[in-house]
Image: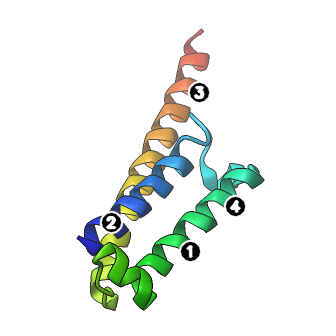
Amino acid sequence: MTAYYWTLVLGQVAAAMATTTTRESLFTYGLPNMMLNICIVFEIVFAVLVIYWKPAENTFKFRALDVTQAAWGMLGFGIIFMFEEVRKKLAAAKERQDKTWR
């Protein structure tokens, strides 16, 4: 259950970052929305707290993840983020191509 929760949290973070722009890469646009950045940090801090702080672990019936398990959860973030960056790159290329043909 803990690994599922961790993956879900990181998937939500990736979705929040992916929807920041529709066409521009986050590598060039950055993350200028300070409220979103604060929420992302709080969400990750809360998830780490729930997973690794004993009283919270017991309350939510979670178990601390080892490094490998945490890394597998991060894979979801990486996949979502990279797929979205590739999609944005292709959309930008298509937009440039469409302008060329007009």
Distance, label 2 to label 3, CA atoms, is 40 Å
Residue situated in front as seen by the camera: 56 or 97:
56
Q: Quadrant of residue 60?
A: bottom left
**Up-down relation of residue 2 to residue 96 (above or below):** below
Between marks 4 and 1, how big is the CA–CA gap?
10 Å
Crowdedness near tag 4: few (<14), some (14–19) or many (≥20) residues, C-alpha within 10 Å: few
Q: Secondary structure at mark 4?
A: helix
Q: Mark 3 highlights which residue? A: 96
The numbered mark, 2 or 4, whose residue comes first in the sequence reads 2
Along the line of sight, the residue nearer the viewer: 95 or 52 = 52
Q: Which residue is mark 4?
A: 38
Residue sitting at 49 percent across and 27 percent down? Answer: 94
Tag 1: Cα neighbours inside 10 Å, few (<14), some, or many (≥20)?
Answer: few
Which residue carries the number 1 mark? 45
**Which quadrant does the N terminus fall into?**
bottom left
Q: SS for tag 3?
A: helix
Task: Report the residue at 36% width, 69% height from top.
Answer: 6
Evaluate if marks 2 and 4 touch, with contact meaning CB atoms under 8 Å apart. no
Q: CA distance from mark 3 to mark 4?
A: 34 Å
